[in-house]
Amino acid sequence: MKIAVLVKEVPDTWGDRRIDPSTKRVDRKGDLVIDEINEKSVEAALLVKEANAGSEVTVVTMGPSSALAAIRKALAMGADNGIHIVDDGLVGSDAMQTSAALAAALRPGGFELIITGNESTDGRTAAVPAMLAERLGLAQLTFLRTLSVTGDGVTGERMTDEGHLDVRASLPALVSVTEQIAEARFPNFRGIMAAKKKKVESLGLAGLGLPADETGAENSWSVVEDVAPRPARSGGTIVKDDGTAGTQLADFLAAAKLI
Amino acid sequence: MAYALVLVELANGRPAASTGELLAAAARLGEPAAVIVVEPGTAGEVAESLGALGAGTVFVASIENADTLLVTPQVAALQAAVLAAGEVSAVLVGNSIDSREAAARLAVRIGGAFQSDAVDVTAGAAGILVTQQAFGGSFTVTARAAKGTPVISLRQGSVDGTAPAAAGAIHELEVTGDTAVGAQVTARHEQTQASERPSLQTADIVVSGGRGLGSREKFVLVEELADALGAAVGASRAAVDAGYCEHNMQVGQTGVTVSPNLYIAVGISGAIQHRAGMQSAKTIVAINKDADSPIFDVADFGVVGDLFTVVPQLIEAVKARKS
């Protein structure tokens, strides 16, 4: 089975993340890491591979040259090869444009299963998987906390606000997974060394066959008019419990008309 | 006037709680019209209640066994409604997983400008302005569509008011397309809100517990405080990972984002990922034994102390004031 798993390089959620006021886009100058949900997506892909002999896992990312590190991390975990979509003309792509580029990169591969995270920690649009499924004409099984591939179908449990659904689809299909799907394995030394020799194909606009007048920030589907940082919180009242803190807290809430 | 289409989710045959708000938002952008997917022959009663909530027209896609298919019937219905409506100023959906994905697929299908998780929408001179929050409320972003029909998912609880009651006239849609080429729902394991507590996303007050609670049994203290305040219950990721409570209660970067009037963090250190899910609350209260916890940096009122003595005292004081 040919499996594609999508990963994204994002600003580290442990750091201070900001939007660049001049470009009105995510500031990617700080520490960049493979999104945590994608380590789990890769793990999910590797588990499917291990359960289906003869499978191959291709890790796919779109991002600047630094995003190669995210691919290498996934290769070190055990993925077989990679596709890196990289082109200056793609900088500032929105979800519509990103899904178009990913679809163009994935279409020739004949993948039977495409695995993504449910949402990235930076954009949190949570729309690219559905858009990609639409573009590729695939059934989508999103927000799965369990995943199993049997014969010609894929089944899993889909999270909802009130519980979960059992869902299934025929292959080929696209699935997105939640952070409950699996704990990611750590790459070992052998994996890290092997990753350096694995093939990563680099794809630009020409290779994707995307017209330049549809890509990049200037052709985005939406225009950002304004970006405003939230005003910093002024220091609050901190008390050390002297035996009456619970009552003091109730007094504070009552004075603020919150109770 | 152009239609502003609203995808209405149905729960047990009734419009979901978010419907009134979506129609109120739609009324700002055009003539509010609802789009529903129903079993054939069941639209009448729903259309009446949608009229009362402000829908002048109710576009009905009658699809057999639609609830056994994920998302695709809704995409087909929206696409047919856009065709039938002629002029459409915007398509609005709730920011639930299902509706957001239906909207995302629709945007690809019709060439629409998809904008996710809006917290406000207004009609401006240059087009519809959509307000969004980035990085858990650290930044407020205002954007508009550059081309195509705006397709917007609206965060629940972000628009006040209601639309004036309207006719709710039924317009049956011709739904064709690939509704069968989708994912199937083979079983539902959902509870309709067993508890009396408000939902986490829309609650006025949220009380969240963290690893400081120490065990699933002791996490009950958080629920007791929530019930005394009429609040929803949330949790930090550490508490969820430790098994103190259910995963859908997780507040933070990878869980739910909340912005209630009052957020009370109990036994939560306040890692940056947790703060990303709650820092836009109007008032933040923290109770934690470690004075160096980062949660105190964002707290309007913080108590450094043992939560097992502070919280019971707080519950008593709250109850005393209420009685």
Image: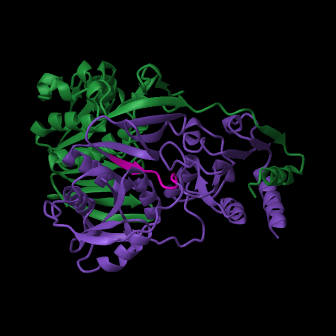
Position of residue B203 measured from the top left corner of the image (x, y, whole percent): 59, 58
Q: Nearer the viewer, residue B114 or A53?
A: B114
Residue drawn at x 57%, y 42% is B274
Apparent side of residue A146 relative to residue B109 in the rendered image (left or right): right
Chain coloured purple in this rendering = B
Residue drawn at x 36%, y 64% is B8
Apparent side of residue B209 relative to residue A130 in the rendered image (left or right): right
Residue drawn at x 60%, y 71% is B196
| Image quadrant where residue A233 sits | top right
Q: Indicate whether B138 appears above or below B192.
A: above
| Image quadrant where residue B321 sits | bottom right
Position of residue A30 measured from the top left corner of the image (x, y, whole percent): 47, 21
Residue A79 seen in the figure: no
Position of residue B214 measured from the top left corner of the image (x, y, whole percent): 67, 53
Quadrant where the image shows the N terminus of chain B: bottom left
Q: Nearer the viewer, residue B10 or B27?
A: B27
Residue A74 seen in the figure: yes
Residue B156 is inside the magenta segment = yes
Position of residue A188 measured from the top left corner of the image (x, y, whole percent): 36, 30
Quadrant where the image shows the C terminus of chain B: bottom right
Residue drawn at x 36%, y 46% is A118
Apparent side of residue A191 relative to residue A106 in the rendered image (left or right): right
Instruction: Magenta stretch: give its range.
Output: B151-159
Residue A78 is inside the magenta segment = no
Q: Indicate whether B94 appears above or below A189.
A: below
Chain A colour? green
Q: Nearer the viewer, residue B93 or A114?
A: B93
